[in-house]
Image: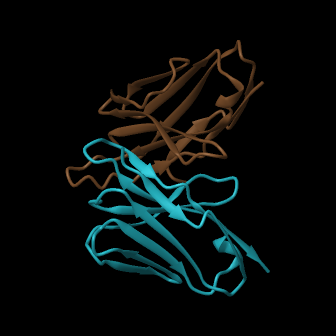
Chain colours: A cyan, B brown
């Protein structure tokens, strides 16, 4: 079945450093979505990418969708303590409802 | 707030108990989902309801029984659970579209502990 893989699983950074998480799908995706889950919270939708090679920005966050529509990345510039949490990518399940989520990348920020 | 509420927020139950989790969405969505989130696994899709009909049971044990009486409410009935069923149970809803974008709006979850 479809698999969505994310690396790294954990990332420790100093406040102010940049952070990147990578997502790879075993199948071509019609779109990819990113979610953020704060500690003790629930996943919250951040963004969706649809087009091959698409790049979208939200303030310090930059999201990319690969040309082959099988991989994606999230880059955070100059991390802040509010960025702490787990970042998940997710893709459609190919003809079925619901999403397949990656395992997530846990971002830990040291002040 | 995402417009999706879940009760209870925390639940401790023994293996012989029967309990139910409740989810309500106020977003006018036409699909609802149950996900399981445990420490060592990614978010696992358990059940999907589209237009109040169950369209998928993702190989979930029969000790978990979903119910969707209308498009705004979703229940998960629990009986004779095992300690390994302890996890965060998340409800989500979405507005299914032909484009398949299917953005999930999650509730706060129920933290379940099975003793």
Residue B33: image x %, image y %?
Answer: 44, 38
A31 sits left or right of A15 in the view: left
Front-lying residue, B112 or A30: A30
Residue B103: image x %, image y %?
Answer: 38, 54
A34 sits left or right of B102 in the view: right
- Number of residue marks: 0
The residue sitting at the top extreme is B16
Residue plotted at (37% across, 44% down): A98
Residue B109: image x %, image y %?
Answer: 60, 42
Residue plotted at (64% across, 15% down): B80
A71 sits left or right of A110 in the view: left
Residue plotted at (55% across, 54% down): A103
Position of residue A25 relative to residue A61, above or below, is above
Position of residue A30 relative to residue B25, above or below, is below
Residue B75: image x %, image y %?
Answer: 50, 26
Residue plotted at (25% across, 44% down): A95
B11 sits left or right of B52 in the view: right
Quadrant into which the C terminus of chain A falls: bottom right
Q: Residue B12 sits in which quadrant?
A: top right
Front-lying residue, B50 or A72: A72
Position of residue B91 relative to residue A38, above or below, is above
Quadrant into which the N terminus of chain A falls: top left
């Amino acid at each position: 079945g479809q698999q969505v893989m994310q690396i790294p699983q954990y990332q420790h950074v100093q406040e102010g450093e940049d952070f990147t998480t990578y997502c790879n799908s075993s199948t071509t995706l019609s779109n990819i979505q990113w979610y953020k889950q704060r500690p003790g919270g629930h996943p919250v939708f951040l963004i969706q990418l649809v087009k091959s090679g698409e790049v979208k920005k939200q303030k310090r966050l930059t999201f990319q969708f690969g040309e082959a529509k099988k991989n994606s990345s999230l880059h955070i510039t100059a991390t802040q303590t509010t960025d702490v949490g787990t970042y998940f990518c997710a893709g459609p399940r190919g003809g079925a409802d619901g999403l397949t989520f990656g395992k997530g990348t846990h971002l830990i920020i040291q002040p | 707030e995402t417009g999706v509420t879940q009760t209870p927020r925390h639940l401790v139950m023994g293996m012989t108990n029967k309990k139910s989790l409740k989810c309500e969405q106020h977003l006018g969505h036409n699909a609802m989902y149950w996900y399981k989130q445990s420490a060592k696994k990614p978010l696992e899709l358990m059940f999907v309801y589209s237009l109040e009909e169950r369209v998928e049971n993702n190989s979930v044990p029969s000790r978990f029984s979903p119910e969707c009486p209308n498009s705004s409410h979703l229940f998960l009935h629990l009986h004779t659970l095992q300690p390994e069923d302890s996890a965060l149970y998340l409800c989500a809803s979405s507005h299914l579209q032909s484009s398949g974008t299917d953005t999930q709006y999650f509730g706060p979850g129920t933290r379940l502990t099975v003793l």
